[in-house]
Image (tube, grey):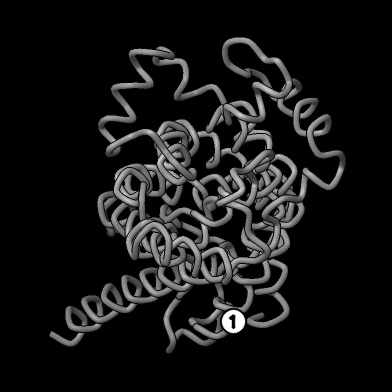
Amino acid sequence: MHGVKSPPCVATLEMSENEGREDEGDGDYESLPPHVSLTTHMTAGAVAGVLEHTVMYPVDSVKTRMQSLQPDPKAQYSGVYQALKRIIQTEGLFRPLRGLNITMLGAGPAHALYFACYEQAKHSLSHTFQSKGNSHLANGLAGSIATVLHDAIMNPAEVVKQRMQMYNSPYRDMWDCVRTMTRTEGPGAFYRSYSTQLTMNIPFQAVHFITYELMQERLNPQRQYNPGSHVAAGALAGAVSAAITTPLDVCKTLLNTQENTALDSMRVSGHLTGMANAFRTVYRLGGAAAFFRGVQARVIYQMPSTAIAWSVYEFFKYFMTQQQLEREASKGSR
């Protein structure tokens, strides 16, 4: 869910919400077994996060290029499919995958922490706001808290990734990009867009989690393991949150890439910093429409990405619960 960014955390101990269910034959799916180690929770989150970012990565590359405010004439695209086709034809089959390695390096630990905190926070906050049942406010706040940790790790990887994705990127590989940025712009360059990223991702994740939980109440009110409902709810949650936060994503891309042509035309000396400056620059270069550059690619990327991440997460949750129940059943039969 990253941009996803992405779905909930795997430190789930929601046992009090599910106490007293009459049907115990199916097990308490919503509560992960208390004996599952933190390492297992974080591994499940890391796997879901890496898959979320990698499966639709070529579309993410297209989105970055389509958000360019003053693209090279050779990098002007009318749609996602046409962009992918032209990139492969003119730059090579693997060009849309450039920057994937740094994304995977960042997504693993970032999502491990992310998944390891969301549901713990949701569990605690739900009891604060609502004694019984699901609290949408708690879901949104828990998602926001998890996002702060996630972005602290993912932001440097995001900067390098987007610089590698741009047309005519001057960097040979990710390490060349890291070394060059550190030497010419300083370590602070990796966090130049952090405040904008948080400003984007906190509402993104709040809308994402609230939408997902709301859809689950409608499609899967018994909260059983239901892959179809997890896919549908995850895809819709990703689409809605991606579309709403696209203007902030365009600003984040400008801060990350420091697009030379655009900044030169605005006579920006040095490097562009700050969300307010990014907003002004985007508006002056393209008006209100510029804030929605790449919205189609962003939605197309997020829908399957968040659906995959939620599906993987819910599968791990179900699988670990079943394993624990089988172990308890075998002990009881002795």
| Amino acid at circle 1 | Ser
Residue at image coords 63%, 73%: 233
Check the image and report above or below for 298 versus 304: above
Q: How many marks?
A: 1
Q: Which residue is mark 1?
A: 229
From the top left corner, tell me how far across and down residue 292 is, in percent: 76, 50
Residue at image coords 61%, 67%: 300
Instruction: Please identify the quarter of the rendering in which residue 319 is found.
Output: bottom left
From the top left corner, tell me how far across and down residue 88 is, in percent: 41, 65
Q: Can residue 212 be seen in this snapshot?
A: no
Task: Return the residue found at the far left.
Answer: 334
Task: Return the residue found at the far right.
Answer: 288
Foreground pick, 149 / 287: 287
Q: Can residue 269 be seen in this snapshot?
A: yes
Foreground pick, 170 / 186: 170
Foreground pick, 329 / 202: 202
Quadrant (top left/top right/bottom left/bottom right) for the C terminus: bottom left
Residue at image coords 50%, 36%: 151
Describe residue 210's horizontal placement relative to residue 174 as left or right: right
The kind of secondary structure element at disc 1 is helix
Estimate how packed mark 1 is, as few (under 14), some (14 to 19) or many (20 or more) residues with alpha carbons within 10 Å. many
Describe residue 161's horizontal placement relative to residue 291 as left or right: left
Residue at image coords 45%, 75%: 29
From the top left corner, tell me how far across and down residue 12 is, in percent: 45, 57
From the top left corner, tell me how far across and down residue 231 is, in percent: 55, 77
